[in-house]
Image (cartoon, rainbow, N blue to C red):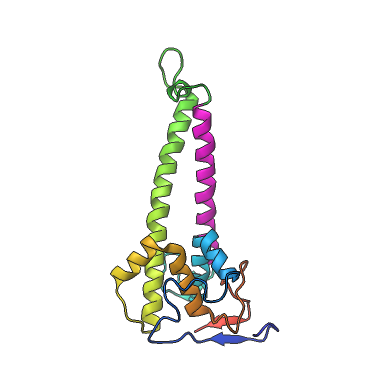
Amino acid sequence: MNTHGEPSTIAPPHGNWKGGIFGCFNDGCFAPYLWCSICCTNCSMGQVMHRLRLDWTGKPTRMAKTIRTFQIVATLACLYWISRALFSWMYTLGHSNGTWMSNFTNADGQVTTGGIFLMMFFIAFTVFNLFFLIWSLCALTRTRMNVRERYNIRGSCCGDLCCALWCRCCTVAQLHRHTGEYENHRSVCCSKTGLHDHVNVV
């Protein structure tokens, strides 16, 4: 295993997946990429996208446009969890007086300033969450499709979509294994590519 920082290049296999969709534990139960895929699926997806030089939508593009791929994906993931935490807190606050509507209206039944703010927040929350869920599904589908096309692996867009829809963390872990060569290069949780900086993927 190369742990000395010498420049290295990974050449993923062509023709077949390196491991099946449910081969999550092929590299052991404590592989960093495995737990990153389980606990922070979108950030882990961002690592694969960054190492393959894809943009934040999963599309191959010019190198200059892929420099911030991981940062963009990680930022969207953080905003998603922050918005969910705020929603939980505001929903609890909305029930603090016993009824939900009592926090939106005054004694005369008119909508309060706080009520308007809450409604605007809930609308923004709903729109952002819908965007995030559609984006994460499309980005993972596109990323898996690009990996298949790059390494001549048989499959279909429909199959990629089903994997992204029903087995997100398993799909991301599979992409990590195929492009990571973890038997020679240990995975890293806190890096843009999930690999050490001296390791490149072709």
Residue 28 highlighted magenta (yes or no) = no
For the point 37% across and 66% down, the residue is 163
Q: Nearer the viewer, residue 54 or 62?
A: 54
* Residue 199 lies in quadrant: bottom right
Asked whether, in this view, residue 2 is left or right of residue 173, the answer is: right
Spot occupied by residue 49 in the image (x, y as percentages of width and height): 48, 70
* Residue 2 lies in quadrant: bottom right
Asked whether, in this view, residue 120 is left or right of residue 7, the answer is: left
Spot occupied by residue 23 in the image (x, y as percentages of width and height): 46, 74
Q: Main secondary structure of the magenta part?
A: helix
* Vertical order, 80 against 23 (above or below): above
Q: Please, which residue is most extreme toward the top here?
A: 108
Spot occupied by residue 103 in the image (x, y as percentages of width and height): 48, 23
Spot occupied by residue 95 in the image (x, y as percentages of width and height): 49, 27
Q: Please, which residue is most extreme toward the right here?
A: 4
For the point 60% across and 84% down, the residue is 184
For the point 56% across and 86% down, the residue is 9
In this view of the protein, can residue 72 be seen by the observer? no
* Vertical order, 76 against 94 (above or below): below
For the point 52% across and 62% down, the residue is 38
Question: Which quadrant does the N terminus fall into?
Answer: bottom right
Asked whether, in this view, residue 154 is left or right of residue 108, the answer is: left
Q: Exactly how many numbered labels are in the figure?
A: 0
* Vertical order, 153 against 116 (above or below): below
Q: Which residues are magenta?
A: 68-95
